[in-house]
Image (tube, helix red, strand yellow):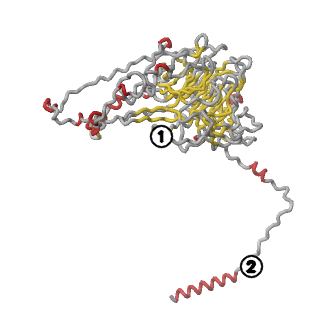
Amino acid sequence: MEQFGALKRRTTDLYTQAQGQIGNIPKPSMPSMPSNLSHFPKLTDLSSKLPKIPTFGLVHPHNDKPTQKATWERIDVPSLPRSSHSINVVSGNAYIFGGSLQPGGQPVDNDVHVITLPFSSAGADYYAVKAKPAPKSEVPAVPTVIEPSDDGKGDDATGEEGEKDLADVPLDPSPNEKGEEAITASENINDGPDSGPSSAKQPAQTEEVDRSSLGDVPSPRVGHATAVIGNRIFVFGGRGGPDLAPLEEYGRVWVFDTKTHLWSYLDPLLPASPLSPAFADKRHHYPGPRSFHSAAGVDQPRDFSTRRRASTWTEWAQGDSNVVGIPQQPIVGNIASTSRDEDDDGYGTFIVHGGVLAVGRVNDTWAFDVRSRVWQELPTAPGKARGATSLSIAGSKLWRFGGFNGETEEGGQLDYLDLVVDDFSEASGERDVVLSARGGWKSIFPEQLPGSPAAPLVAAAEGTTIVEATGEDDEAKVPLKAEVEPYWPGNRSAAGLQTVIGPGGREYLVLLLGEQEPNETDPESAGKFWDDIWAYELPKTGYASSALGAVFGHKRTGSKSHDRPVEGKWLRVETEAYDDEDSTASARGPGPRGWFASAHMGELEERGVVVWGGLDGANNKLGDGWILRLGPEKREP
C-alpha cells in the first residue's frame, strides 16, 4: 500500500513539472477574406464541370418532360413488300402471313414467310412455307373393360342379405335413398322441348353450317387479325376473293402450328348454357365476317386440372395409388403414357375487337375459348365504331387506342377492359374455367392544355384531372391517381401497340407510327402518317411481371377480386441506332408509315418489337423490317 502511495505522488510531481516546462503557444492568425469576389467561379459554372449521373433511359430534355430512350435496328434480309398483313413472333422466328402488294388491294398469297430474327452475333435469315393442312386424326374411344370378379365369394354372396363390398357402396346416397324424388327431363327449367335428362353441365352444341367450301387451309386475305397462344398462331377474318369482300367463314378460327408448319382450324360450338335447344339455332354465337379488326391472345385459362371425386369408399381409401403406386413400390410410366401436348388439347383465349363489315363498322368485342371452341361476347367498347384500332393485353387488362371511324382518326383517350378468369367448380369435382370481363370498358383521358404539341385532346370531366369512366354509362367518374401529362399521342389508326418489359422491369405499352389523316380525295390511297413513338408506363405491381403472359386474377363465381391501380403516364420515345457503326438513317428508323404489322419479340427480347412492311405517304408498299428495343442499351462492340 505504501508503494502505491509513493507511485501516486511520483506521477503527480511529473505532471506538475511538465506543465511548467510548456511555454505559451501563439494563437493562429486567420487571413481576411477579400472584399471583391467577382474573380471567384460561380456555383453554376462548377456544376457544369462536375460528372453527370447516368439517366438509365429516362432523360429530361429542354422542355423538362421525361422521355424514354430506344434503339432501331434494320433486319438484313431480302425485301418483302406488303401492307395490311400480319406478323407474329414465336421462339425467335417472325411469321408473316397475308397482305396486299398490288394497289388494288388484292391478296398476295397464303404462304407463311418466316424471318429468323437476329440475336447476339447471329444474323437474320428468311424462308417461305407453303400452306399445307394438318392430317385429320380421330381419337379412338377408350373401350370399357369389365374385369371378372375375384373376390372369392361366388354366387352365394349376391343375395339381398349378403354384405355389400366397399367398392359397391357409394359415398353419396341416391335421391331415392334420401327420400327425394328424382328430377325428370320434363321438369328442366329451360324452355323448349325435352332435351334429355337434366344435368348441371350440358355439352356444347354444334351449329349446322356447311363449311365444306372453306377448304383445309386459309385462303389468301388482307386485313385479317392474328395472335399467338403458346406455339400456335390464331387467325380470324379478313377480306379476299375477286370482290375483296369480308370472308364469310362462320366463326372459324385458323391455326398455324409453328412446330409442324401445318394448318388446322377450329369451328365454333354453341354455348351449352344458359341457352336451350329451342332457340340456340336461331342465333349466331360468333363474330360476323369483318376485316381490319384487331386481335390479342392470352394463355389464360390454362389450368384445367380437375380433381375427380371418389364415388365409392374403396376409391376414396386408395386415392391414386393404382396410378402412381406407393413410395415403397412406385409405378413408373403411367403418367407419361397418358400425357399430352397442351397445345393439342388447347388452352388460352383469342380476343377480337372492332373492324369493318360489309356495310359499316362495329365496336364489339369477342373472346374465343380455345379449349371449348366457344365464342362469347364481351362488353362493347366506348366511342364510335371503328376499324384499324390498336389492341394489346397488359396487366390483366385489354388496352385499346385509336382507330378510324370512317371519317376521322380516333384518339384522345386510352380505353381498357378488366379481364378475369372465372372458375366454376362444382361439388361433383367438375370444373369449368373461362376468361371473362369484369365490368365494362373504362377510359383514361388526358388533361387539356393550350399549346400542347399533340393532336386535339379530349377534355376530362373536371377539366384538370384524368378521370376514369365506364364505357356503358357515365354514372361514376372517379379521378385516377395518375400523374397529369400535358402531352398525349395524336389521333391515329393502323398503328402498332405492343406490351414490352422496359428498363427496371416495368411494363410499357409501346405505340408507334400509324395513319394521321386519311386521303380526302381517294380513301383507298395512303394519307398522312406519323413517325413518332410513345411509351405508356404502367404502374408497378409489387411482383415480377412478364410480357409473355399477363397476370390474371382468379375468382370463383360470385366472388370479388381487387382492382389493380391504373396510374400511368405517356413518355415520348427518342431513338438512336442500335449499332454505333450504322448510319444516321438507322437512328430515324422506318420513318412515317401505316398499315404495317408489328409484334412483340417474346422470350427472345422482352423489350423488343418487330415492325414489317406497310404503306408510306407516296402510296408505296414497303418491304423492310425493323427491330425497336426500348431502353438505351446498344450492341456491344
Image height of 360 relative to 13, above or below: above
Q: Nearer the viewer, mark 1 or mark 2?
A: 1
Q: Which residue is mark 2?
A: 24
Question: In the orientation shown, which residue stands out farthest toward the right?
Answer: 36
Q: Which residue is mark 1?
A: 559
Is 220 on the left or on the right of 339, as rendered? right
Label 1 Cα neighbours within 10 Å, binned few <14 / some 14-19 / many ≥20: few
Disc nearer the start of the sequence (1/2): 2
Q: Does residue 321 appear in this view? A: no
**Looking at the figure, which quarter contains the C terminus?**
top right
From the viewer's side, name the closer residue of 431 and 478: 478
Q: Does residue 567 appear in this view? A: yes
Give the x, y percent position of residue 389: 63, 27
Is 616 on the left or on the right of 319, as rendered? right
Element at badge 2?
loop
- The type of residue carrying mark 1 is Ser
User: Could you give the CA–CA distance between mark 1 and mark 2, rounded to whole angstroms?
Assistant: 88 Å
Residue 504, quarter of picture? top right
Give the x, y percent position of residue 465: 68, 42
From the viewer's side, name the closer residue of 294 and 601: 294
Give the x, y percent position of residue 324: 31, 35
Label 2 Cα neighbours within 10 Å, binned few <14 / some 14-19 / many ≥20: few
Give the x, y percent position of residue 262: 48, 19
- The type of residue carrying mark 2 is Asn
Element at badge 1?
loop
Is 417 on the left or on the right of 579, as rendered? left
